[in-house]
Image (cartoon, rainbow, N blue to C red):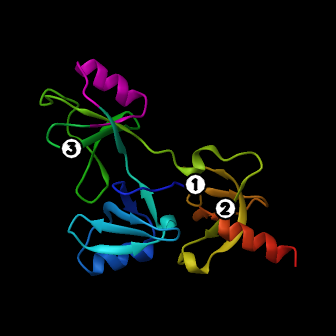
Amino acid sequence: MATFKKGDKVKVVNLGMCEYLKGIGATDTGIVNAVTSNYLQLETVEGIRVCITPASVELLPQEVVNDFNTQAEVWEYLLTGGVVESHLKIQYKLIAGSLHLLDYYGNWIPRADDNFSEFITVKKYLAPVKWYANIPATGILSWVWGDFPEEGGKVSLILGYDSKQRYPFLNYNGTRWRNARPATLEEAAVLIYQANT
C-alpha cells in the first residue's frame, strides 16, 4: 500500500466516501494535510476537510522535476508513462496511445489534438505505481469485495490482476473480485494471530 505525506495529491477511490463527498458538494480529489497511523486528513479542492483511511485513496501523479527543452523531450517522457503539466497547470498523459488531460474532478479525458505548441514550459511528474502492478508469485494478503461496500469484504490471497476483466483481482482458488486492497501490517498480524488460536 502507498505511504502518504503532507502535500500529496490524492483521489478518493472508496465508493461510499465518494458518495459522501458528492453529497456535501465536494469533489473526490484533494491534498493530504495531515497523516496519522490510521487516517489522513484530506482537504478537497473546495477547501472541505475530511478524515479518511489510507486504503480509501490513491496517489495522483506527484511533481518530481521541472522543465523540458523541446517538444520531442515532452513526447519521449509521455511515451515512457510519465505525466506532464503545462504552464496553464493542466496535467497530461498518454492512455492507449492517445493524449489525455486531467480534469477538475481527477478524471483523465481525451484531448482534442496532440499539439503542445502552447507550452512555454512543462513539469515532469512521476506516475505512482499501483499496488497490484507487480503482485509477487506468493500473492498479497488483501481485503476483497464485489459490488457491495468494502465493510462487507473478506480476506483472501490475491495472486493476479487483469484490467480487462470486470472482476480484475484473481485470488488463490481462481475466484475473481471486483475490488481489493492490501491488508495493513496491523490487520495481517491480527489475522495471523486469529488463524493460529
Check contact, mark 1 vs mark 2: CB within 8 A. yes
Q: Which residue is mark 2?
A: 176
**Image coords of residue 110 (percent x, y):** 28, 44
Residue 41 vertical placement versus 136 (above, below):
below
Q: Which residue is mark 3?
A: 90
Displayed quadrant of residue 181: bottom right
Q: Amino acid at mark 3?
A: Ile
Tell me: 105 left or right of 34.
left
Tell me: 192 left or right of 13.
right
**Image coords of residue 152 (percent x, y):** 60, 80
Mark 3 nearby-residue class (10 Å; few <14, some 14–19, many ≥20) = few
Displayed quadrant of residue 115: top left
Mark 1 or mark 3: name the one nearer the start of the chain: 3
Q: CA distance from mark 1 to mark 3?
A: 31 Å
Disc count in the image? 3
Mark 1 or mark 2: name the one nearer the start of the chain: 1
Displayed quadrant of residue 29: bottom left
Residues drawn in magenta: 66-84
Q: Residue at x 54, y 73 (%)?
A: 147
Is residue 59 within the magenta segment? Answer: no
Q: Amino acid at mark 2?
A: Arg
Q: Secondary structure at mark 1?
A: loop
Q: CA distance from mark 2 to mark 3?
A: 36 Å
Q: Which residue is mark 1?
A: 165
Q: Residue at x 43, y 72 (%)?
A: 52
Tell me: 109 left or right of 126.
left
